Amino acid sequence: MSRSHNCGQLTLGHIGETVTLNGWVQTRRDLGGVLFIDLRDRTGIVQVVFNPDYSGEALQIADKVRSEYVLSVTGKVVKRDEETINRNLPTGEIEVQITEIEVLNAAKTPPFFIEDGVEVDESLRMKYRYLDLRRPEMYKTMLLRSKAAKIFRDFLDSEGFIEIETPILTKSSPEGARDYLVPSRVHEGEFFGLPQSPQIYKQLLMVGGIERYYQMARCFRDEDLRADRQPEFTQFDIETSFMPQDELLSLMETLMQRLLKETVGVDVAVPFQRLTYAEAMGKYGSDKPDLRFGLELVEMNDIVAASGVKVFASVIEKGGEVKCLNAKGCGTWTRKEIDDLGPYAARYGAKGLAWIQVKDGEFKGPIVKFFTEEEIAAVKERTGAEEGDLLLFSADTKKVVADVLGALRLKIGRQLGLIDDSVFKFAWVTEFPLLGYDEDQKRYVAEHHPFTRPMDEDLHLFDTDPGAIRAQAYDIVLNGYEVGGGSQRIYKREIQEKMFDALGFTTEVAYEKFGYLLDAFEYGTPPHGGIAFGFDRLIMLLAGRTNLREAIAFPKTASATDLLMDAPAPVDAIQLEQLHIKLAPKPDKEKK
Amino acid sequence: MSRSHNCGQLTLGHIGETVTLNGWVQTRRDLGGVLFIDLRDRTGIVQVVFNPDYSGEALQIADKVRSEYVLSVTGKVVKRDEETINRNLPTGEIEVQITEIEVLNAAKTPPFFIEDGVEVDESLRMKYRYLDLRRPEMYKTMLLRSKAAKIFRDFLDSEGFIEIETPILTKSSPEGARDYLVPSRVHEGEFFGLPQSPQIYKQLLMVGGIERYYQMARCFRDEDLRADRQPEFTQFDIETSFMPQDELLSLMETLMQRLLKETVGVDVAVPFQRLTYAEAMGKYGSDKPDLRFGLELVEMNDIVAASGVKVFASVIEKGGEVKCLNAKGCGTWTRKEIDDLGPYAARYGAKGLAWIQVKDGEFKGPIVKFFTEEEIAAVKERTGAEEGDLLLFSADTKKVVADVLGALRLKIGRQLGLIDDSVFKFAWVTEFPLLGYDEDQKRYVAEHHPFTRPMDEDLHLFDTDPGAIRAQAYDIVLNGYEVGGGSQRIYKREIQEKMFDALGFTTEVAYEKFGYLLDAFEYGTPPHGGIAFGFDRLIMLLAGRTNLREAIAFPKTASATDLLMDAPAPVDAIQLEQLHIKLAPKPDKEKK
């Protein structure tokens, strides 16, 4: 019996109609010989009733069904009695009086209840992902994801972007994260690499005159995993030619605006706030600041350099810095509450955490006595300290200070309830450093990648201070998460050569690593640039989740395992032989 | 200078406007000190003019540019003089008088001309794919592909299908083609397999209550390649629950109808012709018949069994068959022309090719004398032989006869100009055999896959004649190519057990191979089925090409090589060590 309606769709408007429904048994209740089944399909739940008065043989059949049985039922939609109306259910005003039933399939008792909000061990959910996906919140997330992809595509299509698929079996890349490799059967001793991103291909497409490209691209990184990393992930990958950076950013703002409106129904204002990397690090201690609340960090060097607080003075002398976070209203915390911040700060590298309470109109705390009255007044003015505030100081290298106070800002913001989860706050972070110094390799490495275009006004720094060069690179940040990033690319040979030079690559090395791209760049490369959105993370945020795995239909665990398929797994010896490889187990002592 | 217009977009309506164009130099002609450049972007070509009268310094700069230089130019759109109008160019009635120019980039002379219809070695095109893509026909194919993907998606979205991404890093599958493997770094000695299709995942999604799924999925097969195979390929993958086969097929017909209308502007009628596998093989000698022309094969056994043609009689006695192809109008061929068909037929397994010419009102040819007059009359009636026809006979096993006459039918159809390339002729081929007997393994193997549902009316044959069971499987055929295929799936345990039994799998073996799916099937599996379209092949046909590589942005060669990136390639020893594998070269004598 083919369905005529979906379960979640039935309303008072269907009363009197005979309908056929297909779905799963959510619950089954027998009340004095009358059987009530909540039947579920992907659209929702409806109550179907088997009553000796009208169900005949169907009642006997229905009597044997259990949770998660698959049914096809036919019956008449009727209004429920006033006292049995279920206001919590969209279909709660009606029920269906069943006259025919077919049991399409039986089901064993599932290992967990198919409903939202159940407390289930995540590995059990992953092993039985096909049952987990039946839970309404999982289905809703998948629907959201599908819808979001469509919004991206419709928007980009309407702006003249062309979707082009790039290879998955490609070349292991010489820079960046670890690649997954695929041994070749045809070419003995050779390997494909799975792409960390379509970066090279999308730049080649620009050389190829495609001008506006996009792809929902699968990417792969064989890195040790964290909660928000997966070995394979999806990015919405975009590249344009002849489009100035501002135009691209503004186009992406419109896309995000539409995405938020059409998925979660939230209006976000454009243009988004733009912060330089230096501003973001300075005010928020992070290159992906959560801008849903204030609590900005305050520069203290000039005020405290000459103070009696020795550690401040010495840090500043060594080129470090002192900054303050005014934890508004935390001045009433107990000593223990304040002290508890210490270990937390230590996780981010803090060697100590100085603090001042503003209590009974006075500055209080161990370091207060080392300040002059003028210094106290200056601190007060700079930090806006008021009665009941708690000033937290970090003194260390720039990086440690940013990490420590950035983390404390988030912790305290959350603790004080300053973060409104219904708010979506986008920002651009721009002018990232082009190069970072790698102490291991004793050379500069590309912060973004070796084809990122430097800012024109910084080009002269190649000769004097490469580390100070800012890139035409940008991240898009949402609620403290980096949800995308990109850059304008180098398209002029002479700048590319300067870049390789700064990275310590000879022409030969550069050619060996990126020959195909450098060749391509010789044949008329247009100015180009792009961006890629981390689609999994974006969906996670739109769905209001905090775990990336909730946004993916079949995710892998933190140890890169597919618990459902039990992959990876050993393979037959003959398969390896055909691929010209053999296993090379580590000696036992080397194993962890 | 940011572009204000695209090159191909300018018409008489823009006259008088000052425009800025960005693009590549297609050609450059100097006519008495006036410089004419055809500037190309992805939308087309427009003539821009540098004249001492108005171009000033821009002329000197322009004088230095060569083919494929990247320019930004600004100037005024003017009407061309009547005698210089180029009717072959959409922009041929206007030109742009340039006043400003910026050379965005220089270019070396490309290894081949950037224009359609050039004769270039394909490997050169693949190595310089980024230049090849600049050719208008390649860009048009990419645009067609992007558009086709959008049509698929829009249609499926509107029908309530949800796009879900399934993993690329998955498990090596125990049946079917050879897998690509990916060694795991984290799990020593274990491997991921790249998916040959999302088959298992999409069935799990149906178990998971998704009901309507689709995905533009990348698939991988490590098989020896042919002209129409690629190691990685794209399929539009679709699966539904609770949808009868007829409903699915009719939905797909509407999708194809829309696709053809919106890409190539062709109306195709629905419903499509439906042939059973037996009909297709019988009439056309192929399970993917080209139905743009007739030339149907004719069954001859009853007529020729008792004839004096010994080979016919003996073949029939051994259970083989004799069939005839009436090559209309080929009766005038010379003996040499007819004889030349022999070697061609031999490629498809023919041991010989008997023939009869209808000439001067008579049957002529070596075998005619072995027929009685009644037999001649019967042959004539059955084949519809008329003056000027050529009857070709194949006598062999069913398979060889189908292969030989099927191939001859295509060859002769093409030769006679019976195939109209502007016609798109779809058909469904249904009722495929469920099982085929594998002589090597001495057992039945699944023709489609082990989860294909048998036809209900054939279930009893499991006990008596498994080879005769027909499957609820269907292919969609377009102009002689299989462009998609699918099946309804087994969802009842007892039928799945019969199937495994027929395949010679014990419960243990079945569980070892497909445990996760069999487990899943225990928890309330809905009736489900689906289809997958070979997207690359579909695009190839829509673009009017005959080589799959023309439909793919970055294809691989017949030896699974990416000539552009030079992949696969050797990798560093340290990479292999981290993956717990080492190279195992074949001894020299084993190498080909």
Image (cartoon, coloured by chain):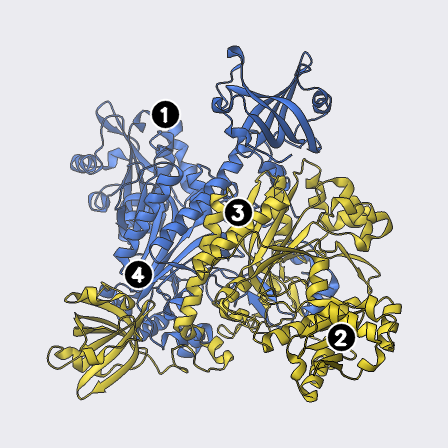
Chain colours: A blue, B yellow
Residue under numbered circle 4 = A471
The answer as to whether the residues below labels 2 and 4 share one chain is no
Instruction: Give whichever of discs 4 and 1 has the lower sequence position.
Output: 1
Q: Amino acid at mark 3?
A: Ile
Tell me: residue B450, above or below residue B388.
above
Does residue B122 lie above or below B446 as drawn? below
Residue type, numbered disc 4: Ala
- Determine the CA span between mark 4 and mark 1: 45 Å
Label annotation for residue B340: none
* Disc assigned to residue B164: 3
Chain assignment, label 2: B
Spatial CA span between label 3 and label 1:
51 Å
Circle 1 is placed at which residue position? A334
4 or 3: mark nearer the eye: 3
Q: Is residue B15 left or right of residue A512?
A: left
- Cα–Cα gap, marks 2 and 3: 51 Å
Q: How crowded is the residue under tag 3: few (<14 C-alpha within 10 Å), some, or many (20+)? A: many
Q: Is residue A127 left or right of residue B149?
A: right
Say which amino acid is labelled 1: Thr
N-terminal of the pair, mark 2 or mark 3, is 3
Q: Position of residue A265 (x, y in %)?
A: 36, 36
Q: Which type of secondary structure does the marked residue at label 2 adopt? A: strand
**Which secondary structure, mark 4?**
loop
Of the pair B318 and B103, the residue shown nearer to us: B318
- Asked whether the viewer can see residue B79, the reply is yes
